[in-house]
């Protein structure tokens, strides 16, 4: 199976809301981010009386037999705290929100690193499994030099340790080769004491933009949105928490499911007219692009300094040819009739 199309959609999900127009760190809407698919440590979730999720639950149906293999891939972002320090003549460093050196702006910010957890293939008739994972803590520093070659600042990037588990269980009680697959993703990272009241600290230990890609060989997934009549009752029993599993990939294929924290339809696609990621909903590329073009030079300077992803958005917009912009103005899509899938 070709996961290229699926992973394009998954990448859009992964970075949805990563930063929002006007793509500046000083913007109010970018002060509290990463609300999609965020799984906090369990202890923090308990402290918040469950208002912050620590677990994501995906349930879907597979029609298969003993030759069916199930593969599961969990993808998410791990946050990195980027802190800027100003270094004075005595060598003392003090944290600052931003630092302007040699005409370049450096800003404190939360970056993100992509993470992936691949669960070994399993037969739907096999035993339940628990698959723990962890990503270790790290601290990296970078010196900033002024025009005279002296150290004028520091950038310190800090990642906290993250621990979690993927728990897979399979119910074959429906018979006739039908299996209900349950995938639980849990954040088991230790987080306690006085830090429990610190949301930023919890966020650095959270699993963010969490989503799951499930794929099968020798079998088929059943659409939960439009299940065939014989599977409708079983589909109605599927319970999903914090995610929405849909068929993904080439239209008509039933070997892949994307379970994301954003509501999608079966076989979602990226619009062909979209020139690239904007992190702020692919349905309004034109208006976002036009708004970026209206930013002042100082606003663009700040956007450029957020991180490489924001810089690439700006560079792509500034270099966009007129014909590409016109393509985003609107497109008429063909209307598909509602259809029932034929399984068997």
Image (tube, rainbow, N blue to C red):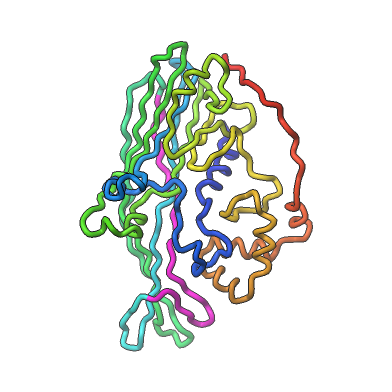
Residue 80, horizontal then vertical, whole percent: 39, 59
The count of marks equals 0
Q: Residue at x 70, y 45 (%)?
A: 272
Q: Is residue 128 magenta?
A: no
Q: Is 223 on the left-hand or right-hand side of 53?
A: right
Q: Is 100 on the left-hand or right-hand side of 89?
A: right
* Principal secondary structure, stretch drawn in magenta: strand
Q: Is 343 on the left-hand or right-hand side of 148?
A: right
Q: Residue at x 31, y 50 (%)?
A: 48
Q: Is residue 105 magenta?
A: yes
Residue 251, horizontal then vertical, whole percent: 64, 30
Residue 60, horizontal then vertical, whole percent: 46, 27
Q: Residue at x 50, y 33 (%)?
A: 245
Q: Residue placed farthest to the left in the image?
A: 193
Which sits in the foreground, 286 or 269? 286
Which sits in the foreground, 28 or 327? 28
Locate the N terminus by quadrant.
top right
The boundaries of the magenta stretch are: 96-122
Residue 130's quadrant in the figure?
Answer: top left
Residue 161, horizontal then vertical, whole percent: 30, 53
Which sits in the foreground, 203 or 100? 203
In the displayed structure, 321 sits above or below 64; it is below
Residue 164's quadrant in the figure?
Answer: top left
In the displayed structure, 240 sits above or below 292; it is above
In the displayed structure, 92 sits above or below 249; it is below
Q: Residue at x 53, y 27 (%)?
A: 224
């Amino acid at each position: 199976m070709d996961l290229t199309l699926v992973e394009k959609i998954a990448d859009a999900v992964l970075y949805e809301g990563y930063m929002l127009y006007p793509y500046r760190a000083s913007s109010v809407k970018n002060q509290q981010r990463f609300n999609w698919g965020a799984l906090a440590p369990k202890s923090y979730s308990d402290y918040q009386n469950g208002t912050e999720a620590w677990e994501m639950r995906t349930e879907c149906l597979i029609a298969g037999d003993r030759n069916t293999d199930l593969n599961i891939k969990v993808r998410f972002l791990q946050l990195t705290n980027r802190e800027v320090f100003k270094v004075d003549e005595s060598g003392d460093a003090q944290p600052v929100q931003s630092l302007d050196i040699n005409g370049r702006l450096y800003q404190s910010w939360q970056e993100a690193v992509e993470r992936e957890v691949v669960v070994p293939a399993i037969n739907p008739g096999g035993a339940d499994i628990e698959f723990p994972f962890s990503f270790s803590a790290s601290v990296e520093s970078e010196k900033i030099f002024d025009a005279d070659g002296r150290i004028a600042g520091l950038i310190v990037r800090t990642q906290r340790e993250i621990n979690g588990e993927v728990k897979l269980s399979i119910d074959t009680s429906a018979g006739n080769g039908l299996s209900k697959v349950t995938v639980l993703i849990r954040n088991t990272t230790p987080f306690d004491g006085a830090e429990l009241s610190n949301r930023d600290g919890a966020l650095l230990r959270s699993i963010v933009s969490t989503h799951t890609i499930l794929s099968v060989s020798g079998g088929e997934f059943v659409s939960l949105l439009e299940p065939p009549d014989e599977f409708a009752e079983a589909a109605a029993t599927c319970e999903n928490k914090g995610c929405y599993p849909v068929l993904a990939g080439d239209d008509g294929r039933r070997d892949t499911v994307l379970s994301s924290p954003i509501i999608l339809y079966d076989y979602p696609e990226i619009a062909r007219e979209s020139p690239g990621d904007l992190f702020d909903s692919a349905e309004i590329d034109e208006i976002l692009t036009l708004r970026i073009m209206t930013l002042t030079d100082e606003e663009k300077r700040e956007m450029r300094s957020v991180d490489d992803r924001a810089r690439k958005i700006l560079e792509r917009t500034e270099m966009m040819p007129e014909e590409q912009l016109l393509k985003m103005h609107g497109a008429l899509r063909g209307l598909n009739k509602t259809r029932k899938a034929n399984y068997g």
